[in-house]
Image: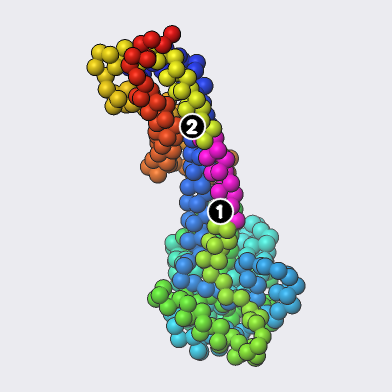
């Protein structure tokens, strides 16, 4: 009977549903977009490693005066040696120095390939492993050998289908023997993670000089001691750099959760505003449902009297009109979920991200629409149930 009442007033039912549809579509579109974006961002940040910290000159998140950080002293080999000697909590420590260089093999030449000078511990701190060949060893680093490990993108550019192991490539004006190729890592926020070459730390310093700035990566296998390790690092560096107790740190200790917190702070306000807009649409839709249901009660007063006269009780009348309101809002909710999913998918496809409808988003859509239907329909249904059958039958 509730469904027949809605079908008999198709246009009115559709217009009433429209407010709920717009609100749910807005919320599901944003929810689908948020889930896809969060999956991408947190997936990218997981490449950094939750238990790895990076000691360097600049913090990853700069607040305030940039020149305060610009004027800091570089992290040098002296700090790295102190950390190796005194940082007892870290299980792996790797120095990292960088330089863009020209790389060539036979007639293939490429500019601005990122060269990283590091040690054998880098495979742990950066979570990389060779797909073929091997990684640097302690002997490679200690003896300053002219060997290198290639990222997958560099390998594809230089060798195409040729086996790179044992081949000699030119980096700058020096020749290096390829000993390994790393597994493909993909992109990190649009930047390739495979377009680099790794060489022994001592070899890098011998060729390009040992006075450039560097960063130091430290990894602990005991996640629960991460904060303790950061405190130990801070104490070692303040002592080595001769920082007085009254002065603030002139170095940065960076880790994954800094970027995670930044992302959440940048997006939480925006997402909240959009949800408020969707909530307002649902509120307007709920008011529309209540208004139409009050009109429907007035139009069908005589019908209500007839039903009561032949045995319908308050509960029957209340259920009928309440169900009509819930059906209207549920139809809007279902359509809103479908349109919201496609809307979110369209947004994510423009960002080259994947999407998927989750149980959470379905529950949110149904929950919002059903709740609005119950709240908006209860008063008109209660009013209809309270009508006197005699007065209703006399209504014209």
Q: Quadrant of residue 281?
A: top right
Is 151 located above or below residue 225 in the figure?
above
Inspect this view and state whether residue 294 appears: yes
Nearest to the eye among marks 1 and 2: give it: 2
Is disc 1 in contact with disc 2, using a CB cutoff of under 8 Å?
no
Using the numbered discs, state the Cα–Cα distance from disc 1 to disc 2 in whole angstroms.
26 Å
Rendered view: 389 above or below 151: above
Q: Which residues are magenta?
A: 266-282
Rendered location of residue 382, percent (x, y): 37, 28
Q: Pick whichever, 139 or 259, lies toward us.
A: 259
Which residue bears the numbered disc 1?
A: 268
Residue at the location (63% across, 66% down)? Answer: 61
Residue position for label 2: 286
Q: Residue at x 55, y 48 (%)?
A: 272
- Residue drawn at x 36%, y 11% is 393
- Between 327 and 163, which is closer to the camera in this rendering? 327
Q: Colour mode?
A: rainbow
Residue 183 at x, y percent in the picture: 46, 60
């Amino acid at each position: 009977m509730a469904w027949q009442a809605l079908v008999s007033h198709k246009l009115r039912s559709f217009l009433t549903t429209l407010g709920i549809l717009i609100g749910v579509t807005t919320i599901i579109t944003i929810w689908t977009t948020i889930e896809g974006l969060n999956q991408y961002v947190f997936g990218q940040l997981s490449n950094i490693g939750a238990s790895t910290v990076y000691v360097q000159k600049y913090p990853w998140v700069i607040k305030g005066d940039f020149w305060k950080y610009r004027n800091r002293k570089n992290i040098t080999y002296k700090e790295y040696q102190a950390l190796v000697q005194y940082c007892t909590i870290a299980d792996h420590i790797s120095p990292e120095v960088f330089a863009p260089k020209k790389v060539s093999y036979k007639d293939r030449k490429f500019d601005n390939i990122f060269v990283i000078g590091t040690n054998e511990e880098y495979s742990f701190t950066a979570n990389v492993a060779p797909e073929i060949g091997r990684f640097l060893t302690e002997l490679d680093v200690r003896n300053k050998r002219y060997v290198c490990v290639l990222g997958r993108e560099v390998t594809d550019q230089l060798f195409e289908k040729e086996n790179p192991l044992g081949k000699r490539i030119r980096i700058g004006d020096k020749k290096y023997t390829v000993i390994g190729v790393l597994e493909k890592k993909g992109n990190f926020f649009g930047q390739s993670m495979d377009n680099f070459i790794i060489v022994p730390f001592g070899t890098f310093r011998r060729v390009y000089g040992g006075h450039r700035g560097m960063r130091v990566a430290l990894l602990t296998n005991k996640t629960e001691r991460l904060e303790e390790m950061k405190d130990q690092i801070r104490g070692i560096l303040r002592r080595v750099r001769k920082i007085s107790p009254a002065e603030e740190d002139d170095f940065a200790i960076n880790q994954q959760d800094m970027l995670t917190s930044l992302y959440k702070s940048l997006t939480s306000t925006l997402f909240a505003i959009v949800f408020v807009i969707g909530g307002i649409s649902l509120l307007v839709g709920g008011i529309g449902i209540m208004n139409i249901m009050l009109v429907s009660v007035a139009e069908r007063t005589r019908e209500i009297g007839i039903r009561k006269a032949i045995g319908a009780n308050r509960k029957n009348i209340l259920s009928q009109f309440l169900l009509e309101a819930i059906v209207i809002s549920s139809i809007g909710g279902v359509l809103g979920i479908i349109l919201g999913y496609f809307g979110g998918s369209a947004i994510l496809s423009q960002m080259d991200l994947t999407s998927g409808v989750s149980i959470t988003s379905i529950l949110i859509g149904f929950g919002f629409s059903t709740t609005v239907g119950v709240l908006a329909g209860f008063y008109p249904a209660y009013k209809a149930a309270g009508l006197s059958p005699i007065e209703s039958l006399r209504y014209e």
